[in-house]
Image (cartoon, rainbow, N blue to C red):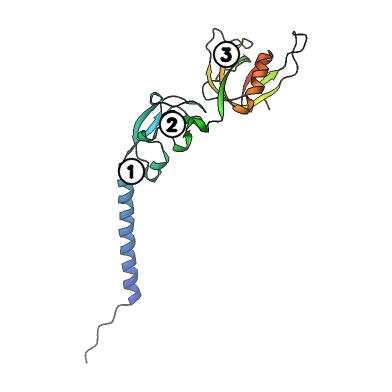
Amino acid sequence: MMHSRARRPVFGDVRFIIGVVLVIASVAGVWLLVSSSRQTTPVLQATRTVVLGETIDSGDLQVVDVGLGVLTDAYLAPQDLEPGSVAIRTLSSGELVPLSAVGPAEDARTTTVVVNSITTPDGVGAGTVVELWHAPLHKDGRSFDEPRILVGDAVVVAVAEADGMLAQSRTDVEVVIDRADVAAVLAAITGEDAISIIPAGSGS
């Protein structure tokens, strides 16, 4: 009497096929990842600290080839830099430039002023976020009122170099401020208030 060969369970074949498909998908995914990482795109990188509101030109940037994959479109390509563009936020030296960090000059809501600070702590330089404090001059012209905050979020553009940098020596500091604060700052300057610069958060 002849016996028929036992049939293999169907679900066993399905699991085998699924396993093969998963292996192929895994290999394909690794291959795509490696291929993507090898593809580079030219984008712009800041060669110096560019502060909020400052005009950006080609001399402030360099072209670098990087592998960003799907993030490539989020960064500024050489052909995307428009003449007269300004920094919407401060860019650190060596940072790849995001598209969101650059915009037309007419969108800028900031301007720069130079203040004569009686206090400029060590380490304050281009790109440092600072508070401006002022002590109004009394009518007698010889004493000052209690210090109070003038601008809560200015950004330093440059600090004038001075010999010695004594704690109470006055130093010219160029800062970026919101246009809404310009009148108050100019009034403090013309009123000969004592103005101090403090890293943001230190005065609270």
> Quadrant of the rendered structure where residue 22 is?
bottom left
Mark 3 to mark 2: distance in Å? 28 Å
Q: Which of the two discs, 2 and 1, sits closer to the camera?
A: 2
Q: Are marks 3 and 1 in contact (CB under 8 Å)?
A: no
Q: Residue furthest right?
A: 140
Q: Secondary structure at mark 3?
A: strand
Q: Earlier in the sequence, mark 3 or mark 2?
A: 2
> How far across and down, in percent of the image, does residue 144 sit?
74, 13
Circle 1 residue: 37
For this rendering, which residue is in front, 108 or 173? 108
Quadrant location of the N terminus in the rendered image: bottom left
Which residue corresponds to the image point at 60% horizontal and 27% vertical from the top-left?
Answer: 179
Q: Amino acid at mark 2?
A: Glu
For this rendering, which residue is in front, 195 or 26? 195
Q: Which of the two discs, 3 and 1, sits closer to the camera?
A: 3
Quadrant location of the C terminus in the rendered image: top right
Q: Amino acid at mark 3?
A: Asp
Q: Residues within 10 Å of mark 3 (few under 14, many from 20)?
A: some
Circle 2 residue: 95
> How far across and down, in percent of the image, does residue 61 sit?
39, 27
Decide if residue 178 is on the left or right side of residue 39: right
Q: Amino acid at mark 1?
A: Ser
Which residue corresponds to the image point at 75% horizontal and 10% vertical from the top-left?
Answer: 143
> How far across and down, in percent of the image, does residue 33 sit?
34, 48
Which residue corresponds to the image point at 41% horizontal and 32% vertical from the top-left?
Answer: 82
